[in-house]
Amino acid sequence: MLALTRRLLLCALFRSVYAACPPSCECSEAAQTVKCVSKDLRAVPAGIPGYTRTLFITGNQISRIGPESFKGLDNVGILSLSNNRISEVDSHTFAGLSRLRSLDLSNNQLAVIHPDAFAVLNKSLRELNLSRALYNHTSVMDLATSLCQSSLGKLQVLDLSDNSLVYLPPRVFSHMGGLRRLQLSNNSLVALHNSTLSGLESLEELDLTLNALKTVPEEGLRELDSLPGSALLLGENPFMCTCGIESFAAWLNGSQDRVRDAESLSCAFPASLRNTSILSVGSLTLGCYQKDARAELALQTSYVFLGIVLGFIGLIFLFVLYLNRKGIKKRVYDMRDACREVWEGYHYRFEADSDPRLSQVSTSAEL
Ligand SMILES: *[C@@H]1O[C@H](CO)[C@@H](O)[C@H](O)[C@H]1NC(C)=O
Ligand SMILES: *[C@@H]1O[C@H](CO)[C@@H](O)[C@H](O)[C@H]1NC(C)=O
Ligand SMILES: *[C@@H]1O[C@H](CO)[C@@H](O)[C@H](O)[C@H]1NC(C)=O
Ligand SMILES: *[C@@H]1O[C@H](CO)[C@@H](O)[C@H](O)[C@H]1NC(C)=O
Ligand SMILES: *[C@@H]1O[C@H](CO)[C@@H](O)[C@H](O)[C@H]1NC(C)=O
Ligand SMILES: *[C@@H]1O[C@H](CO)[C@@H](O)[C@H](O)[C@H]1NC(C)=O
Ligand SMILES: *[C@@H]1O[C@H](CO)[C@@H](O)[C@H](O)[C@H]1NC(C)=O
C-alpha cells in the first residue's frame, strides 16, 4: 500500500516535471524553449511551462490572441507567432509578458488591432516584426494608434516590410526615440510627408527599397534630412526622370555618404532614360532647358512664318496695283481734278465769305 502511494506520488512528480508540455508542442527545459510548430492549432495551447524563455507558436491556424493566451509566462523573452492567421489582437494581449524582448508577428492578417494591444510591455520590447502582418493597408491606422499608446521607447528594430502600405500616418514613430532600424521595404509608399519620420533621433538605418516613390520632393527630402545619423536605402523605386527630379538628383549627389545604394538608383521612366543612373541625370539630360529652348524656337518659327505670310500678301497687293496702274493713274488724275474743283470752289467761297478786315490785313502783310 505504502509502495503504491510512493509510486503514485513519484508518478505525479514526474508528470509535473516532464509531462508538463502541451500535446503538439516540444518542450526543452534545459534550453528553456517551447516549440509548437505547424500543428494546426486554433489557439495558443494551455499549459506552456513557466520556465519558457523562448516560445515558438508558428505555422498554425491561430486567428485571435488576447491576454489570456499568455498567462503565467512572465519569463518569455522571445515570442514568435509568425505564419498564423491572426486577425485580431485584443487589449493588453502582451501585458503579462513583462520580460518580452522580441515579438514576431510576421505573416499574419492583422485587421483588428486594439488600441491597447501592445500596452504595458514595460519598455522591455527591443524588436517587433510586423513584416507581411497586416491584412490590408487600412489596418495601418489601427496599428499606428496602438503603437502610439504603448511604451515602446526602448524598441530598436521595427520591421514593417511587405505590407502594401500606401501611407504612413504623421508621427507614427514619434514614441520610438530608441529605434535604430526601420524596415519599410516592399510597400507602396508614394511620398514622405511632413512629420512622418519625426522622433526617430537614434535611427541608424531606414530601408525604403521596393516602394512607389517616383521622386522625393522638398518635403520628403526635409524628412530624410531630419535623420542625419541614419543610413538610407532607396533602391527599386520607380523614379521618374523628368524635370521635377532635379532637386532630388542634386540632393542625392550631395548625400552619397548616407544613401548606401545611391550609385544603383536609376530611372524607371521615361523609357528613353530607363536604367540611367539618377546621379548622372543633370538638367541637360533631362531636357528641361532644351524643352524651354524648343518652345522658344517654335515661337520664333511662328513669327517668321507670320512675317513671310504678311510679306506675301503685301507683294500680291503691290502686283495688283502694278497691273492696274493705268486705271489707277486715271483714277488719281480724276480724283485730283475733282479735288481741284472742290478746292477752287472752296477757295472762291472763302474769299467771298471772308472778313474784309482780314483780307485787308493779308494785303497789308503782303505789302
Ligand atoms: C481592409 O479590410 C477591411 C476589413 O478588415 C475592409 O473593411 C476594408 O474595406 C479593406 N480595405 C481595403 C482597401 O481593401
Ligand atoms: C518592469 O521591469 C522591471 C525590470 O526590468 C521590473 O522591476 C518591474 O517590476 C516591471 N514592471 C512591471 C509593471 O512589470
Ligand atoms: C521578420 O520576419 C521576416 C519573415 O518572417 C523575416 O524575413 C525578417 O528577416 C524578419 N525581420 C527582422 C528584422 O528580423
Ligand atoms: C512584396 O510583398 C508581397 C506581399 O505584400 C509579396 O507577395 C512579394 O513577394 C514581396 N516581394 C519581395 C520582392 O519581397
Ligand atoms: C510641410 O512643412 C513646410 C514647412 O515646414 C510647409 O511649408 C508645408 O506647407 C508643409 N506641408 C504640408 C502638406 O503640411
Ligand atoms: C555633385 O557634387 C559634386 C561635389 O560634391 C559637384 O562637384 C558636382 O558638380 C555635382 N554633380 C552634379 C551633377 O550636380
Ligand atoms: C534595365 O536593367 C535591367 C536589369 O538590370 C534589364 O533587365 C533591362 O533590360 C534594362 N533595360 C534597359 C532598357 O536597358
Image (cartoon, grey):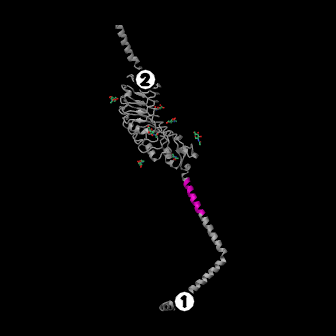
Q: Which mark is residue 348?
A: 1
Viewer-closest of 12 and 175: 12
- What span is in magenta? 290-305
Q: Earlier in the sequence, mark 1 or mark 2?
A: 2
Q: Main secondary structure of the magenta part?
A: helix
Left or right, 145 with reference to 270: left
Query: Is ligand 3 closer than 8 angstroms to the Cβ of mark 2?
Result: no
Q: Which mark is residue 34?
A: 2
Viewer-closest of 361 and 172: 172
Marks 1 and 2, Cα distance to the nearest angstrom? Answer: 133 Å
Residue 219 on image: x %, y %: 44, 46
Q: Is residue 97 above or below residue 219?
A: above
Residue 3 on image: x %, y %: 36, 8
Residue 42 on image: x %, y %: 44, 27
The residue depicted at 43 percent of the width and 23 percent of the height is 34
Query: Is ligand 5 closer than 8 angstroms to the Cβ of mark 1?
Result: no
Q: Is residue 14 above or below residue 246?
A: above
The residue depicted at 54 percent of the width and 55 percent of the height is 292
